[in-house]
Amino acid sequence: MRSLDVFASEKLAALEQRQLRRSSVVTKRQGIYCTRNGRRLLSFSCNDYLNLSQHPVIVDAAVEAAKRYGVGAGASRLVTGNHPLYADLESRLARLKGSEAACVFGSGYLANTGIIPALSGPDDLILVDELSHACINAGAKLSGASVHHYRHCDVEHAETLLAAHRANHPRALLVTDGVFSMDGDLAPLHELSRLAQHSDAWLLVDDAHGLGVIGGGHGSSFANGKPVDVPLQMGTLSKAIGGYGGYLCATQPVIDLMRTRARTFIYSTGLPPPVIAAAIAAIDVIESDPAYAAEPLRKARHFARATNLPEPQSAIVPVILGETNAALAASQLLEEQGFLVVAIRPPTVPQGTARLRFAFTAQHPDTEIERLSAIVRSHVLRQ
Ligand SMILES: Cc1ncc(COP(=O)(O)O)c(C=O)c1O
């Protein structure tokens, strides 16, 4: 066997032994249901919080754009991939987030790995919440800056780290998820914003799971009515928006800097026109129907109440089970009852915190949520 194959095989065998080998199961999605291994399952593992990925008006917008403009961008946005639809999408995103300007990237992952190194370099300081998404950490690493993690949502710890390190660096970036993707809790944005302003640090919030769901659909910095001052509002078009792509909303100079310095913007092909058209149509739905945007959180709270779990702050409800095999067994048990709730295990979450992660969407029927809750109570939590 060639050394390359030996390397891959041994690595896989070691992961398999720790139940950490991943495999992607073929899954056909139809509305809120999925078909996997020949079984039809009600999915609680999709981030399509508003079920917009299959909304007929949005699908029509994508089909129409595909027919008019084709299915690919043809090049990077700085070459010929800057389709006229982008201007509309970016101004709609800026309006939704209350910012001066916006810039769309190929995905949320590409956004963070482009934005962070465009703003920070080896001389700089980056503070990151320890439970932030992998792509924030990837962006921080790529920047070459000094990176410190503060304890989850612990503003005092962030303050201590800033007090210790801020003076040694010309610039500082403070980065957090707005809604934590595996825990569903909200970052203390008011406090982080105050701390950032006090320390001349720039606050970057990744609101992948807040847009379309929290604060009337505007996102987690709008959770309590008056928006928090977040100069760098990043997010994705792949969750509540239902499609694909990432974005940054910020002032015009910051957005202009992204267009000329963010490597994942410059050196990656633009989004396909149907994806841009779909995102615009999705924003129409969110802006026109804030009551609909409130539904995923209402459903999550209904489930939590019925299951005796703490009140959720977002559409994501974790049930932490500890060891990987416990989470896999619980997921299997729910699958046998017709529910898809994928087990989340390390390294996506810290060791010893493998879990079921329930993601609620606007169209989950209350009766099915109640059936799910009864099974979780009696068979997973054994209440
Ligand atoms: C918090 C967070 N940020 C970024 C991403 C990446 O976004 P995308 O899937 O658009 O690359 C995700 C999704 O996986 C996420 O949960």
Image (tube, helix red, strand yellow):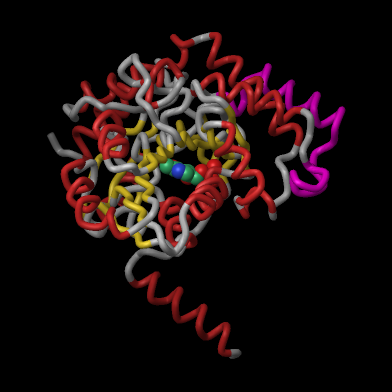
What x and y, as percent, mark residue 362?
45, 19
Q: Quadrant of the C terminus?
A: top left
Asked whether 218 or 340 is in front, the reply is: 218
Q: Which residue is depicted at the point 55% across and 39% down?
A: 254
How many labels, in total? 0
76 falls in the magenta region: yes
Q: Which residue is depicted at the point 67% across and 26% down?
A: 278
Residue 274, quarter of picture: top right
- Name, please, the residue furthest toward the right: 68
| Residue 36 seen in the figure | no
Q: In this rendering, is residue 213 above or below 163?
A: above
Q: Is residue 93 left or right of residue 116?
A: right
What x and y, as percent, mark residue 177?
37, 40
127 falls in the magenta region: no
Q: Is residue 361 left or right of residue 276?
A: left
Asked whether 155 or 237 is in front, the reply is: 155
Asked whether 188 or 146 is in front, the reply is: 146
Q: Which residue is depicted at the point 50% across and 83% down?
A: 7
What x and y, as percent, mark residue 213?
42, 23
Q: Quadrant of the N terminus?
A: bottom right
Extent of the magenta region? 52-81
Q: Is residue 65 left or right of residue 107?
A: right
Q: In this rendering, is residue 360 above or below 120?
A: above
